[in-house]
Amino acid sequence: MKCPYCHADNDRVIDSRSLQEGITIRRRRECVACRRRYTTYERYEGIEFKVLKKDGVREPFDPDKLRRGLEKACWKRPVSGVQIQAVITAVLHKIYESFEAEVPTDQLGEIVMDELRTLDQVAYVRFASVYRQFQDVQDFVDELRPMLKDAPRPNVSP
């Protein structure tokens, strides 16, 4: 690995940590020549998943695109970056378990919404509104109805 600072090809690993439930390894390195430290990541190079869009177009699965969508849905919500990463990891595990080389967008969206539903209901509704292309308030009501039916009722005395 070449040092990003002095470009010497001699470093040593100071620390290694498993991330994303073993999908990624983070390595902290120190250049032997200039003594500066930097971080590298190793990821499993498996099957490149494709996303099958509604119009039939296939494009590479992009976890960063998923992250951006989740960050928008969780904007100003009490959801940390660690929790968003946990959702991404859970989604990756589910698609690797359930699909060979491509995942249809409708099934990918449902997997993401299942994860968000348990994390934050407001983020879930935000994501669903974009994913399912809500057109009016009735679409929101239809999405909320099952959640409200299952929600515990507060004890309010008359």
Image (cartoon, rainbow, N blue to C red):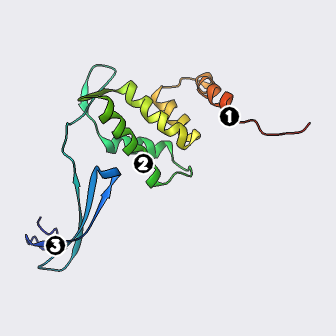
Q: Is residue 1 left or right of residue 158?
A: left
Residue at 56 percent across and 43 percent down: it is 120
Q: Earlier in the sequence, mark 2 or mark 1?
A: 2
Q: Which residue is drawn at 16% across and 72% down?
A: 12
Residue type (three-letter) at the residue carrying disc 1? Ala
Could you tell whether 23 is left or right of 79 in the image? left
Label 2: element kind: helix
Q: Quadrant of residue 50?
A: top left
- Measured Cα–Cα span from mark 2 to mark 1: 24 Å
Label 1 sits on residue: 151
Q: Residue furthest left?
A: 9
Residue 86: which disc? 2
Q: Earlier in the sequence, mark 1 or mark 3?
A: 3
Depth order, front residue of 73/27: 27
Q: How crowded is mark 3: few (under 14 residues within 10 Å), some or many (20 or more)?
A: some
SS class, disc 1: loop
Q: In which quadrant will I find the N terminus?
A: bottom left
Residue 12: mark in rendering? 3
State yes or no: discs 2 and 3 in contact (Cβ < 8 Å).
Answer: no
**Which residue sits at x=52%, y=30%?**
129
Image coordinates of residue 113 in percent, x first then y, are 48, 34
User: Mark 1 near mark 3, Cβ–Cβ under 8 Å?
Assistant: no
Please state if 32 lies on the left or on the right of 64 as rendered. Answer: left
